[in-house]
Image (tube, grey):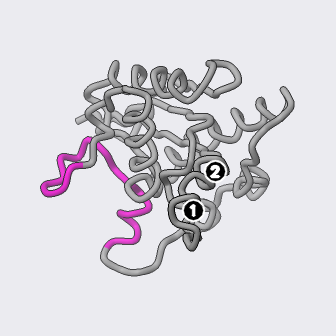
Amino acid sequence: MTQHFIAFDCEFAWRADWHAAHLSMDPSSQRRSVSVKEVIPIAAYAFSIDADGALAIDALASWNQRDWGGEAEVLEQFFDFVRRRPDHTALGYGSIATDLPILRLAAMSNGLRLPEQLIDLPGKWDRKHFDLALAIKGRGRTWVHLSQLLIRIGVPLALLAGKAEAPLPESADEWSGLRDHVELDTLLLALAH
């Protein structure tokens, strides 16, 4: 049986203005919660694996605020990409703890509806979303960073250079670098899966 996936990666910017607004209500707060992070780029890589393990590439796409106008436009493009593939399982890394809450808040604040694969409901797991980091962690307490997993499975270090850093871009070259960063992360996530 062929399995279909959408590996995705998001990067976020911490919004000092949103944090300052929160501090105006609670000056003692040191929280930098997900609620003060904004979606900057998203990349998605759709692929399939058949019963023999053969990989079929569907599409690789990315969206960022520089090219699309803002968070709402980036989200709309990504959500549309996912909705057009209802038989695909969304594949993330640390996505249940980080990506999905931020995407949910961003969708709410921009008046957008999440695709079915990105809705995390309590209770029975419907397998529309798979968080590889959570699957590796299991019931234990230790989280494994994606770069650690990739090193362990033999991915060349040159591909991982700068993986931990995704600074907020200012120049056109930096925006291009951020796009490359999230696109590479989706491919590495698919490889790790």
Residue 127: % across, % down: 23, 46
Crowd rating for badge 1 (residues with CA inside 10 Å; few <14, some 14–19, many 20+): some
Mark toward the start of the polypeptide (2 vs 1): 2
Q: Which residue is mark 2?
A: 14
Residue 52: % across, % down: 34, 39
Q: Residue at x 52, y 70 (%)?
A: 144
Q: Quarter-wise, where is residue 69 in the image?
A: top right
Q: CA distance from mark 2 to mark 1?
A: 8 Å
Q: Residue at x 51, y 53 (%)?
A: 192
Image quadrant containing the N terminus: top left
Instruction: Kindly state the secondary structure of the residue where label 1 is placed.
Output: loop
Q: Which residue is mark 1?
A: 32
Q: Where 108 sits versus 130, above or below? A: above
In this view of the protein, which residue sits in the foreground, 90 or 187? Answer: 90
Residue 23 lies left or right of residue 142; in this view the side is right
Residue 148: % across, % down: 61, 67
- Report the magenta residues as a range: 121-138
Q: Amino acid at mark 2?
A: Trp
Residue 121 numbered mark, or none: none
How many numbered callouts?
2
Residue 96: % across, % down: 37, 55
Q: Quarter-wise, where is residue 141 in the image?
A: bottom left
- Whether 123 is among the magenta residues is yes
Q: Are marks 2 and 1 in contact (CB under 8 Å)?
A: yes
Instruction: Kindly state the secondary structure of the residue where label 2 is placed.
Output: strand
Q: Residue at x 53, y 21 (%)?
A: 73
Crowd rating for badge 2 (residues with CA inside 10 Å; few <14, some 14–19, many 20+): some
